[in-house]
Image (cartoon, rainbow, N blue to C red):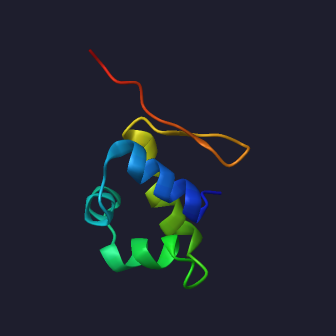
Amino acid sequence: MLSPIQCKMARAALSWSVKDLARQAHIAANTVVRFENEKHEANPSTVLVIKQAFEAAGVLFTDDGGIVPPKKSG
């Protein structure tokens, strides 16, 4: 399961704003903010679409709670 800290790390690795992630995951920006700030228990389907958006951009998530940023081309 994707954690709020992994979400923040993945956004940073991609240089994505909250709005960028929301756009890519097809969710509201407020949903991203609430998830990252752990304001409420996130719906598993919401966490899944966030994770899928990052994976589509090339981010990998490790079992120990880390991330592997996408490889830069060029």
Q: Which quadrant holds residue 68?
A: top right
The answer to whether 69 appears left or right of 19 in the picture is right
- The percent position of residue 12, horizontal first and vertical second, equals 40, 50
- The percent position of residue 1, horizontal first and vertical second, equals 65, 57
Residue 55 in view here: yes
Residue at image point 57% right, 60% down? 5
The answer to whether 74 appears left or right of 71 in the picture is left
Residue extending farthest to the top is 74
Residue extending farthest to the right is 64
From the viewer's perspective, is residue 49 above or below residue 33?
above
Residue at image point 26% right, 65% down? 19
Residue at image point 45% right, 42% down? 55
Q: Which image quarter holds the C terminus?
A: top left
The answer to whether 37 appears left or right of 11 in the picture is right
From the viewer's perspective, is residue 23 above or below residue 73?
below
Q: Which quadrant holds residue 63?
A: top right
- The percent position of residue 38, horizontal first and vertical second, equals 57, 78
Q: Which quadrant holds residue 39?
A: bottom right
Q: Nearer the viewer, residue 49 or 20?
A: 20
Residue 28 in view here: no
Residue extending farthest to the bottom is 40
Number of numbered discs on residues: 0
- The percent position of residue 73, horizontal first and vertical second, equals 30, 19
Q: Nearer the viewer, residue 8 or 48?
A: 8
Residue at image point 33% right, 59% down? 21
